[in-house]
Amino acid sequence: MDAVRLHVGTGHLALTHSLADGKVAILSHLESLSPLSDDDRALLASALGPFSSWREGHELIKCDAILDDPVFVVSGWVGRVVDLHDGRRQIVAFYIPGDLVGFSSRPGAQARASHICLTNVVTANAREVIRNARQESVRYSALIGALNAVEDEINKGLIDQIVRVGRMAAHERMIDLIADLYRRHRRAGLGFANGFVFPLTQETLGDAVGLSTVHINRVLQQLRRENLIKTTTGRIEIPNPALLAVRPER
């Protein structure tokens, strides 16, 4: 992958803050899956990186590429995308800060969809962290457990997406997606009070839930009227998160 390597200096305070938040999100995500040891945290602090920046629209991982270069999202959003011949696309997964992209425990595993930067993105290479953890699996057993759980999460996310698009009504699809994103932001220590940064366009949302832009607009208006969500530019607030549940916890 070609990218501009980031060299953060005193003139880049906003970027430094973003990187710090992203590192916390990575740690919080992994900790939510398996309580990490001091050795695990030290490995993440020393072996994570290098950091790379990517412009919106960049193909981070090509379809059919070997999954041998996993990265953590530090800032921005990445989508797992399937393109159709006529230009339409289906987004099957979103990756937010703290998430691990392009990871598989199977040697030689291939990407079955493209991974596209939906916004400007900063990533941290995870290859050395994973290599060291596997080489000393007893010492880093909790981190190995978290990585295994990440793979389980990816599979669960695909099942959730099939159910969302295949069997839910339009407003249920949107509620379920927002609820999932809210939960993941909270888990990673991101967002604010009952909300989170939401940089996606209505077109991108439509690509994720299988609806036209016009239909997305109507659904969002309905959710606002019902006071299930409040939206401002680039942000979404959930006044009562308990009301977003449309499927049983599992």
Image (cartoon, rainbow, N blue to C red):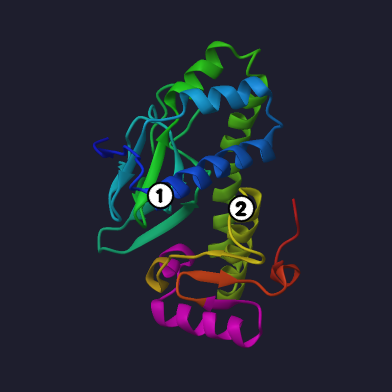
Q: Is residue 104 left or right of residue 52?
A: right
Give the amino acid at mark 2: Arg
Stretch in magenta: 205-231
Q: Within the image, what quadrant is residue 249 found in?
A: bottom right
Residue 192 shows in the view = yes
Between 104 and 183, the one nearer to me in the picture = 183
Q: Is residue 63 above or below residue 161?
A: above
Q: Within the image, what quadrant is residue 227 found in?
A: bottom right
Q: How many marks?
A: 2
- Percent from the top left, x then y, of residue 188? 61, 48
Q: Which residue is mark 2?
A: 184
Mark pair 1, 2: CA separation: 26 Å
Give the amino acid at mark 1: Leu
Q: Is residue 159 above or below residue 63?
A: below
Name the residue rendered at 24%, 36% in the picture: 2
Q: Is residue 188 left or right of residue 108?
A: right
